[in-house]
Image (cartoon, rainbow, N blue to C red):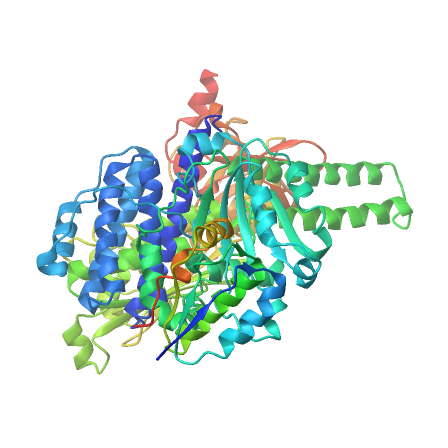
């Protein structure tokens, strides 16, 4: 973490940008579905505007210039001068994608992505003769942004100064007891540089004598400067019991429970911040020169009441309800917490073991206390793991972009529907899922869906549909990619597999076995390499990525109706179900997901291929046999023709191998401990864990071990050491 | 038809109720003369904002004309954009 406040604000701006880009995508999706209501268009406008504003505060010229032009076009749409046709919306998607690229390139200090000029030119064409004016000055006024720096003072000054966020809602007694909101606001503004915003409900009742004395207005004040909470409380001394006050240091959201925070959201568009400086400077917000935010109010004024309802409806439609109260925490801190909880689990296991060793009976208080302790640690562990969980929505949005780009390049009409966007999955899982999902989505567009003419001929809509869904099922996450295309052409798949020598010409395969041929390395159904998915990476890479995450992938397909890939993933990567085994007096953990079965090794089933190669016959099938202890360099070649126990493991490509172990100890959940960078990449070893007795055990990656085992260098290595 | 009303100098607690009744009695487009206002309190502000909203919702125009310096200063302190009250007329 950096101590440079500016770098931190800058970082939080980019985080904010990601959120804005997300809502931008959401709103564009709603527009794409045909909703052109003012609020949805406003969401697009505001997102772009806010990015521009923040970028301006940091002097990110390129970002400012691009978003300004995007904003100009959206302003035209908002004012009704430009009709958001499907073509225009397509272009907006493209622009939004590019905006995202520019944001990321700016964040990472990379060169600007290509294609900017083409998109800007297309936007210009859309605008007609008016064209796009380059921005003259950044007319950034505060909008519904959580970072409202750049308003009162220069951003760095503003941030260095401590500040407070105050929400103040008078209740019935405040005015009738002779107090006055105006005086309180004045006192507050005398404490420091105050930004006052009146939160005006959209649905004020028409004034009557009866309701005139029921306070409905509330205020949000941002106070910067050297002010203590005590100073602020003092202002509210006489009214503390007749109003609701929330005081929080800046950076923490102040809200007074549900109704008021809803009100804050509603009021954000209408409210205009007034900046007051105790040093008698004139208000920084020039009311005459209102920017888009206020102009919008003027335009929509007669529909104010209705638009607020539309806004709520719009928000529900997009699923973008007002954000729940959240805190942003550095990932490092969470990981430390996860680690600590892992330690706690280990410690608890060690304690349980020593209690058992001490011979304390199962009925004793100590044991029952220990049991509830164990349950608590499990709960704690699960809760902590859930902190790392994130909704899959951003990932799905990335896929939406892939669909747009992929369908455009092959000339197919494709619609992506996502389900379960808010399903939460471990952050690392999400990150590592991006590549395989991208590949599968491209595959679905390229191979899964038919060309429009063929779809029409088959009596389907010319527009193909891909459904991407996520859900929790039985403690795992299920992600499905389903297309409504032609399904897997099984005779063709079979032919190709035979031609490539993957299966015997006379092999009898069930439908699902044929479908699973797609996962074999070196399998590609298209004869010519297409620009899209035929890049020499096949579904085997997808499968190995999924297995790498401890997941499984299955495929189902119905001819003429489509194909569905189902990915089942563990909720977290921090714990793992493993089998604790012994080999050459070492305790090792083999992930349960890699083990197909265990079997006894009878000397009669061992067949020698060459000096070093051994095969084992299991159920009339021959699998390569490896000695785990030897493979890891713990011992020299074991005595031949000796019986033992084997673990039958499945490699990523579906081939099997047998690992000889000395004993199977137990099956248990283990906490994964990274080995750290200093050891480098050790072939066959994935990580380590600490067992209940305090012993450290390596967690193996059997597939990697077997792959490495084909190079007979391990015993040489051992000899050299 | 535009109904015109001159606002009293002190729009404080005691003024809110009468103000609400007076405005409620107006028909058609509304124009409020704020040239003589020396004090604007929170409740009266609310009455004015509510009146502006309900007029707009009904398609009537609502305007505050000739606001005094004190009136504008109060709006600034309240953090209310004057355009909510003064600039808008129904289209």
Question: In the depicted view, which residue is nearer to us: A474 or A608?
Answer: A474
Residue at the farthest left position? A129
Residue A292 vertical placement versus A286 (above, below)? below
Left or right: where does residue A63 sit relative to residue A216?
left
Residue B57 vertical placement versus A554 (above, below)? below
- Residue at image position (75%, 36%) is A350
- Residue at image position (35%, 62%) is B87
Residue A692 vertical placement versus B91 (above, below)? above
Left or right: where does residue A232 sit relative to residue A609?
right
Question: In the depicted view, which residue is nearer to us: A110 or A23?
Answer: A23
Q: Is residue A678 visible?
A: yes
Left or right: where does residue A161 sit relative to residue A501?
right
Residue A252 image position (x, y, % from top left): 56, 44
Residue A204 image position (x, y, % from top left): 52, 70
Residue A564 image position (x, y, % from top left): 36, 67
Residue at the farthest bottom position? A459
Image quarter for residue A293?
A: bottom left
Residue A160 vertical placement versus A396 (above, below)? above
Residue A109 image position (x, y, % from top left): 29, 32
Q: Is residue A642 visible?
A: no
- Residue at image position (40%, 78%) is B58
Question: In the depicted view, which residue is nearer to us: A419 or B60?
Answer: B60
Marker count (numbered) = 0
């Amino acid at each position: 973490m950096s101590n440079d406040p500016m770098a931190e604000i800058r970082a939080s701006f980019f985080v904010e940008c990601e959120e804005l880009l997300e809502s931008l995508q959401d709103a564009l999706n709603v527009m794409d579905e045909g909703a052109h209501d003012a609020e949805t268009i406003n969401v697009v406008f505001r997102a772009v505007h806010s990015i521009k504003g923040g970028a301006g505060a940091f002097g990110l010229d390129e970002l400012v210039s691009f978003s300004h032009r995007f904003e100009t076009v959206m302003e035209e749409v908002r004012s009704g001068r430009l009709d958001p046709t499907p073509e225009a919306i397509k272009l907006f998607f493209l622009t939004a994608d590019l905006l995202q690229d520019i944001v990321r390139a700016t964040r990472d200090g990379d060169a600007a992505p290509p294609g900017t000029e083409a998109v800007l030119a297309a936007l210009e064409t859309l605008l007609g003769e008016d064209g796009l004016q380059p921005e003259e000055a950044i007319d950034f006024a505060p909008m519904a942004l959580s970072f409202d720096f750049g308003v009162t003072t220069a951003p760095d000054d503003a941030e260095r100064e401590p500040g407070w966020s105050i929400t103040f809602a008078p209740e019935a007694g405040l005015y009738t007891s002779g107090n006055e909101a105006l005086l309180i606001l004045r006192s507050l503004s005398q404490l420091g540089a105050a930004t006052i915003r009146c939160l005006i409900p959209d649905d004020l009742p028409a004034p009557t004598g009866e309701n005139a004395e029921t306070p409905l207005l509330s205020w949000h004040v941002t106070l910067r400067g050297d002010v203590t909470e005590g100073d602020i409380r003092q202002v509210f001394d006489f009214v503390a019991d007749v109003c609701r006050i929330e005081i929080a240091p800046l950076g923490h959201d102040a809200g007074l429970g549900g109704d008021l925070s809803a009100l804050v959201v509603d009021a954000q568009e209408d409210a205009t911040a007034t900046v007051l400086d105790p040093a008698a400077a004139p208000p920084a917000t020039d009311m005459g020169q209102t920017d888009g935010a206020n102009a919008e109010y003027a335009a929509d004024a007669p529909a104010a009441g209705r638009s607020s309802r539309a806004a709520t409806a719009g928000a529900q439609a997009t699923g973008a309800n007002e954000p729940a109260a959240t805190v942003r925490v550095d990932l490092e801190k969470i990981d430390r917490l996860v680690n600590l909880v892992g330690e706690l689990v280990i410690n608890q296991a060690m304690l349980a073991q020593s209690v058992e060793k001490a011979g304390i009976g199962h009925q004793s208080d100590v044991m029952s206390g220990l049991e509830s302790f164990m349950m608590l640690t499990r709960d704690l562990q699960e809760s902590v793991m859930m902190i790392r969980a994130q909704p899959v929505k951003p990932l799905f949005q990335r896929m939406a972009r892939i669909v747009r780009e992929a369908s455009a390049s092959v000339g197919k009409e494709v619609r992506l529907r996502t389900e379960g966007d808010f399903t939460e999955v471990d952050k690392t899982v999400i990150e590592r899922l991006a590549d395989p999902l991208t590949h599968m989505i491209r595959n679905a567009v390229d191979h899964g869906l038919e060309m429009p003419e063929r779809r029409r001929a088959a009596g389907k809509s010319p527009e193909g549909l891909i459904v991407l869904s996520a859900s929790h099922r039985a403690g795992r996450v299920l992600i499905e990619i389903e297309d409504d295309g032609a399904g897997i052409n099984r005779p063709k798949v079979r032919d190709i597999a035979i031609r490539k020598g993957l299966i015997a010409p006379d092999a009898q395969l069930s439908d699902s076995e044929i479908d699973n041929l797609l996962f074999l390395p070196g399998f590609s159904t298209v004869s010519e390499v297409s620009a899209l998915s035929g890049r020499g990476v096949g579904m085997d890479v997808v499968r190995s990525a999924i297995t790498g995450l401890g997941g499984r992938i299955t495929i189902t397909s119905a001819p003429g109706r489509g194909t569905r890939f189902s990915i089942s993933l563990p909720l977290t990567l921090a714990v793992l179900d493993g089998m604790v085994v012994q080999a050459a007096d070492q305790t090792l953990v083999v992930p349960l997901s890699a083990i197909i079965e265990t079997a006894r090794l009878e000397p009669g089933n061992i067949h020698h291929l060459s000096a070093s190669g051994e095969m084992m016959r299991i159920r009339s099938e021959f699998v390569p046999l490896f000695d785990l202890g030897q493979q890891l360099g713990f011992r020299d070649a074991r005595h031949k023709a000796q019986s033992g126990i084997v673990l039958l493991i499945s490699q990523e490509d579906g081939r099997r191998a047998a690992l000889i172990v000395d004993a199977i100890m137990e099956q248990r959940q283990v906490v994964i401990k990274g080995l750290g960078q200093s050891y480098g990449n050790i072939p066959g070893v994935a990580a380590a864990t600490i067992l209940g007795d305090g012993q450290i055990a390596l967690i193996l990656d059997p597939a990697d071990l077997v792959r490495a085992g084909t190079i007979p260098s391990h015993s040489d290595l051992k000899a050299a050491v | 038809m535009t109904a015109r009303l001159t606002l009293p100098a002190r729009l404080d607690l005691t003024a809110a109720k009468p103000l609400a009744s007076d405005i409620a009695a107006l028909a058609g487009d509304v124009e409020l003369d704020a040239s003589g206002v020396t004090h604007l309190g929170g409740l009266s502000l609310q009455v004015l904002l509510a009146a502006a909203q309900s007029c707009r919702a009904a398609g009537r125009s609502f305007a505050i004309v000739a606001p005094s310096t004190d009136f504008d200063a109060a709006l600034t302190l309240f953090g209310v954009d004057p355009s909510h009250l003064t600039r808008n007329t129904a289209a």
